Amino acid sequence: MLLPYLEANRLEAGCDEAGRGCLAGSVYAAAVILPPDFQNEDLNDSKQLSEKKRYALRPIIEREAIAWAVGVVTPEEIDKINILKASFLAMHRAIEQLKIKPEHLLIDGNRFTPYPNIPHTTVVKGDGKYLSIAAASILAKTYRDDYMNQLAEECPDYHWVENKGYPTKAHREAIRKFGITPYHRKSFTLLPKQLTIEF
């Protein structure tokens, strides 16, 4: 059973990201403030849910949340600042878009770049512990999946509908065969060393 909040009687925003380990595409993050009495027994870490369940929960979260927002950091930005900083920047961009300023942030993971004037708590595997972080994980994942599905129409050879940019065998084989796209993260090891390609 996921917990509704870390501390009662304050506005807490749960934050999580999606796409950190991908070879291609932007990294997405979401911030969600849920009402203290929010309940949904289906809500869980997005990785534990089917695609159908994630998309069914998204409109419920958006309708019932006090506030929610999604932040994005592009592959070009990832290559400039590194993926860890990009993940935190995506969370910052989500937080700054919230229509209501939270009093506290619940961050999935063990590290975070502090957001100005809002204290935070990092929670390892928080998307399986707190409702607001689980909700954020679902929004980040589904909005990123929508984006990767759109890119897949433009670049069908890379199987992004199936792998969403993650380093699957089919994705790496396509990179070896066709080279890279403008959406690939050039700072990542896109192929094993014995299969390096020229950019």
Image (spheres, rainbow, N blue to C red):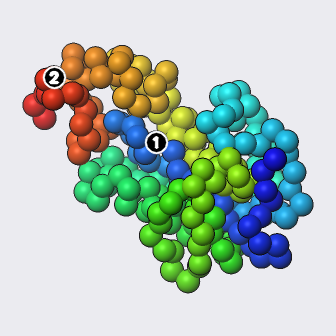
Q: Which secondary structure lies at badge 2?
A: helix
Of residues 153 and 131, the one drawn nearer to the viewer in this rendering? 131
Q: Is residue 69 visible?
A: no
The Cα atoms of the two marked residues, 1 and 2, are separated by 24 Å
Q: Which secondary structure lies at badge 1?
A: loop
Seen as rendered, the residue at the extreme left is 198
Q: Residue at x 41, y 31 (%)?
A: 166
Can you identify the residue that label 1 sits on? 19
Q: Residue at x 67, y 65 (%)?
A: 13
Q: Quadrant of residue 190?
A: top left
- Tell me the kind of residue under disc 2: Leu
| Front label number (1 vs 2) | 2
Q: Which mark is residue 195?
A: 2
- Tell me the kind of residue under disc 1: Gly
Locate residue 192, reporting x and y percent: 21, 27
Locate residue 76, reporting x and y percent: 29, 50
Pick the quarter of the image with the C terminus.
top left
Q: Earlier in the sequence, mark 1 or mark 2?
A: 1
Relative to 179, does residue 76 appear above or below in the rendering?
below
Q: Is residue 11 left or right of residue 180?
A: right
Locate residue 53, reporting x and y percent: 73, 31
Q: Do the CB atoms of the residues marked 1 and 2 lie less than 8 Å apart?
A: no
